[in-house]
Image (spheres, helix red, strand yellow):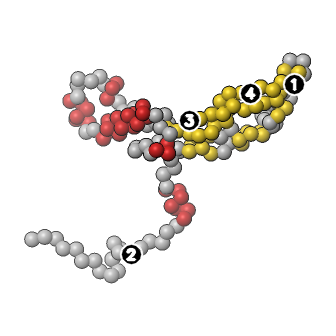
Amino acid sequence: DYLQFKPSPTSQFLKRSKRNNVHLKRNRPRHCRRRKMIVDFSKLNMTDWIIAPVVIDAGVCVGTCSFPLGIESNHTNHAVIQSVWSRYLRSMDPFDQISANTQSKRSMTPPPLPCCVPHELYELPMLFFQGDNQVVLNHRPDMIVQSCGCK
């Protein structure tokens, strides 16, 4: 004997739901990526010493670094093993964790998932006043996010 399923034409199982673009965008996973972050030095009251640029796109890293890490995530090997180990520990049965008394309690605590952080940063050439109104061109390192990655 076996169970037989024969849906009726009006069955909820067969009905298609209308797609809602807003709903799809809201529930879609947001992987690690660079977004614009416009910084206006005049609004920070810094233009009394910064001559140029007054407005920059410094960039910001946003999104998740969820398992499995894809090639587009610019991840490190450490991030991969951290992600795998975290997922493994979170999936363990609590009784298995107790019986694994060969490891310390601290090593059985799942580590956090990797974070979305700057992967590649560029310098920012800046013109500013120094000392007694001397104009200086200085290249400030690591000011502009070029790309992001899971670390």
Mark 2 vs 3, N-terminal side: 2
Q: Which disc is residue 135 wearing?
A: 1
Residue at (90% x, 18% y) in the render = 132
Work out whether residue 1 or residue 64 is closer to the camera in this orientation and state it. 64
Residue highlighted by disc 2: 15
Residue at (34% x, 35% y) in the render = 85
Q: Is residue 34 above or below residue 52?
A: below
Q: Position of residue 35 (x, y in %)?
A: 62, 45
Mark 2 vs 4, N-terminal side: 2
Q: Which disc is residue 139 wearing?
A: 4
Residue highlighted by disc 3: 119
Q: Give the residue type at disc 3.
A: His
Q: Position of residue 119 (x, y in %)?
A: 56, 35
Work out whether residue 19 or residue 65 is closer to the camera in this orientation and state it. 65
Residue at (68% x, 38% y) in the render = 58
In the picture provided, is 67 more to the left or to the right than 116? left
Q: In terms of image quadrants, where is residue 51? A: top right
**Dot 1, how many residues are within 10 Å of its Cα: few (below 14), some (14-19), or many (20+)?**
some
